Image (cartoon, helix red, strand yellow):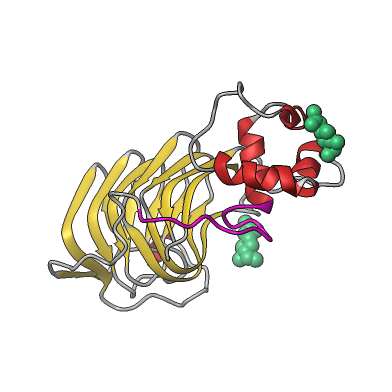
Amino acid sequence: MYRLILLVLIPAVLGCLNADTNSCASFIKSQSATASPFCATFTQSTVTATTGLPAWATNCSQRPSLISKECSCYYTGTGSGGTEPTGTVPTGVTTTLPASSGVVTSSAPITVTASFDGGMKRYDRSTTVCEEQTETGEDDTIFILEDGATLSNVIIGPNQAEGVHCRGTCTLNNVWWSDVCEDALTLKQSSGTSYINGGGAFHAADKIIQFNGFGTVQVTGFYAQDYGKVVRSCGNCSGNGGARHIILTNLVQ
Ligand SMILES: *[C@@H]1O[C@H](CO)[C@@H](O)[C@H](O)[C@H]1NC(C)=O
Ligand SMILES: *[C@@H]1O[C@H](CO)[C@@H](O)[C@H](O)[C@H]1NC(C)=O
């Protein structure tokens, strides 16, 4: 059975609020008979309307994003102590690594300034630079995407360390990682939205997406198998403090 997260809209800098001091967290945590079934439904689609919310939403300032986030802390997704929704795989999400149409090895990262379509070939470094969880840098990627670049139809092999780095906003279409090393994708945009459409990642000892910049990353129809976390928000990046929004839709794990 696949676990399916249908919606998570998280201001990732905030994390879960303190249930001892925040009325929204307190209600959702303590009133499980009311909150649990509500949360299970509420997180199944994107909710932005502030009408039609239950009376107790006053405890959450009528904010759907806050309700969604606190729900995910206690009842759904990767929050603690909850059960995760199960379901069938949504149309358009692929749950197996696509066959590669060939292999390309490179001794250095490949920089993409506009767009690059890999034709479903497997791209990898010619001499392995993967040192598992040792944090390295751009030099140990296989693709570096300049601001606004698009990378499509690529399988990334196991011999790189840092997968793809986006220097600004970027779009990834149908990009796969067969065996994530340190992480799969690092986002360094200062603002704006990056899009990850389709694709998937396997065997990430820790995280798949590392969000070091600010703005929004929108992940749609992505498959993750055998990993620590799908997205990690940087905790100690220099200049930390701006908002990071992470929107996961039809993420299958
Ligand atoms: C707000 O939360 C408190 C404490 O959990 C609860 O007693 C109260 O009923 C909630 N407000 C509404 C309008 O439901
Ligand atoms: C952030 O923490 C990691 C892991 O402890 C460390 O390797 C890295 O150097 C730190 N970065 C900064 C900017 O402090």
Look at the image and give the residue range highlighted in magenta: 74-89
23 vs 178, nearest the viewer: 23
Residue at horizontal 69%, vertical 26%? 62
Q: Position of residue 114 (x, y in %)?
A: 24, 41
Picture quadrant where residue 184 is located: bottom left
Q: Position of residue 59 (x, y in %)?
A: 78, 31
Q: Examine the rendering and report whether any part of residue 13 can be seen.
A: no
Can residue 54 be seen in this snapshot? yes
In this rendering, position of residue 20 left or right of residue 35:
right
> Which image quadrant shows ligand 2?
bottom right
18 sits left or right of 3 in the view: right
Please report the residue visible at 57 percent of the width from the left and 39 percent of the height from the top. 42
Residue at left 43%, top 36%? 193
Residue located 43% across and 55% down the image = 87
Quadrant for the N terminus in the image:
bottom left
Q: Answer left or right for 180 relative to 119.
A: right
Q: Quadrant of residue 129?
A: bottom left
Q: Is residue 91 left or right of residue 40?
A: left
